[in-house]
Amino acid sequence: MKKIELRKKEREKKTQDLQKLITAADSNIDSRKADKKKTNKKFQQQQKVKETTAVRWLKATIIL
């Protein structure tokens, strides 16, 4: 009887540990997605600034 209970407890512990790992991996993926979105937005903003600067330079060059 004790062996059965011991095995059951071990299985439950392994199940809990596995669930913790899955939860940690999911939260890690979610945080990476959020970081990627922030980086992508920042890159888009930088592109807009570069384009704006280039357009201003071209306009100034053409007017001169």
Image (cartoon, grey):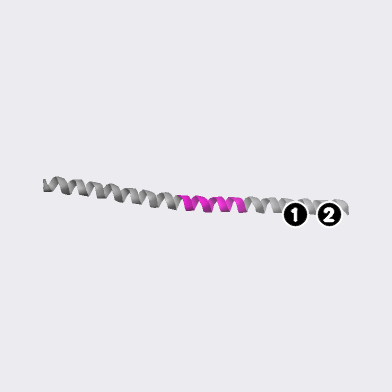
Q: Which mark is residue 39?
A: none
Can you say which quadrant of the picture contains the C terminus? top left
Identify the residue at horizontal 33%, vertical 48% (top origin): 46
Q: Main secondary structure of the magenta part?
A: helix
Residue 38 at what x, y percent from top left?
Answer: 43, 51
Which secondary structure lies at badge 2?
helix
Residue 13 at what x, y percent from top left?
Answer: 74, 51
Residue 56 at what x, y percent from top left?
Answer: 21, 49
Whether the residues at callouts 1 and 2 have beta carbons within 8 Å, the answer is no
Q: Nearer the viewer, residue 29 or 49?
A: 49
Kind of residue at disc 2 = Glu
Q: Which mark is residue 5?
A: 2
Q: Which residue is mark 1?
A: 12
Kind of residue at disc 1 = Glu
In the image, the segment drawn in magenta is 23-35
Which secondary structure lies at badge 1?
helix
Mark pair 1, 2: CA separation? 10 Å
Identify the residue at horizontal 44%, vertical 53% (top origin): 37
Q: Is residue 32 magenta?
A: yes
Q: Residues within 10 Å of mark 1 (few under 14, many from 20)?
A: few
Identify the residue at horizontal 64%, vertical 50% (top origin): 21
Q: Is residue 24 magenta?
A: yes
Q: Residues within 10 Å of mark 2 (few under 14, many from 20)?
A: few
Identify the residue at horizontal 25%, vertical 47% (top origin): 53
Residue 7 at what x, y percent from top left?
Answer: 80, 51
